[in-house]
Image (tube, helix red, strand yellow):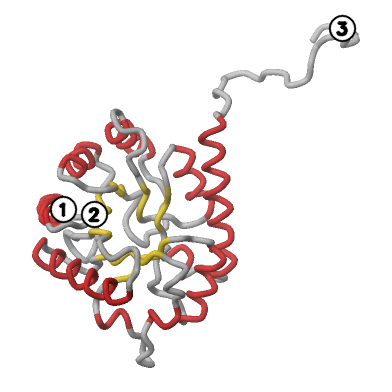
Amino acid sequence: VGTGRYESHAIMAESLEAAETHCITVAVRRERLYDEQGQNILDAIDLNRYILLPNTAGCYNAEDAVRTARLGREILLGLENAGANWVKLEVLGDNKTLLPDPVATLEATRRLVNDGFQVLCYTSDDPIMARRLKEAGATAVMPAGSPIGSGQGILNPNNIRICLEYLKMDDPDYPVIVDAGVGTASDVAAAMELGVDGVLLNTAIAHAKDPIGMAHAMRLACQAGYWAARSGRIPKRLYATASSPLEGVIDGGRR
């Protein structure tokens, strides 16, 4: 769960607790660590409870992303947090669509992997790009369900299915996480039912009318989708199939 765009740090903290998340993302820019009152966002987070995942939000080229990731590592090493060598890599193409720049993302992934980072990589739902990022050493690939903050949900579930096929073909435990575009709990359930390992979201909780209630809903949806994916849905059929046994039915005429 992300930590940005909440009305206050107090609401953020309660929302994180309601979501029962174990890992939270933090944008690594000084101005984003402090609110308008000058309070540090880290003061509102239980650093012993959560793994912090620094992200490179706001970076538009590989150089800035690498520099930001290194800054995040320094901050978390000072906090002795388990996420010090992790980074959620975002390298955006422009500020209108907030879609990832594939060339810069791939370059930054290679550089950060060589620098010892565990790279969790935000990307589009392009299966070929997803495969290239894994080949470059990304620890996890995080295809977008739809543009960041759009609330459109999973626009192309078939692409997510192909991403899963390509990434897990020879490595079934490889983490695939839907990142971006979630609007409500049903989007989370739908993503999990596709077979992904998790969903990363922020705006859907932070901008909900009741962020704490929505965080609770997202947790339940994640659990529901997880178990549904592993339990096996029934096939879709054109015609009805009776669910009650036919033995002993009184035949009163033509059915």
37 horizontally vs 135: left or right: right
Are there few (<14), some (14-19), or many (20+) residues within 10 Å of tag 3?
few
Distance from disc 2 to disc 3, alpha carbons, whole Å, reads 67 Å
| Point 34% across, 35% down: residue | 164
63 horizontally vs 217: left or right: left
Q: Earlier in the sequence, mark 1 or mark 2?
A: 1
Q: Which mark is residue 18?
A: none
| Circle 1 SS class | helix
- Look at label 1 and name its amino acid: Val
Q: Which residue is mark 1?
A: 113
Find residue 33 and report its horizontal and vertical position in percent: 32, 80
| Circle 3 SS class | loop
127 horizontally vs 8: left or right: left
Q: Nearer the viewer, residue 26 or 209?
A: 26
Q: Which residue is mark 3?
A: 253
Which quarter of the rendered picture does the N terminus lie within?
bottom left
Distance from disc 3 to disc 1, alpha carbons, whole Å, reads 72 Å
- Look at label 2 and name its amino acid: Val
Find residue 129 and report its horizontal and vertical position in percent: 19, 42
| Point 58% across, 58% down: residue | 217
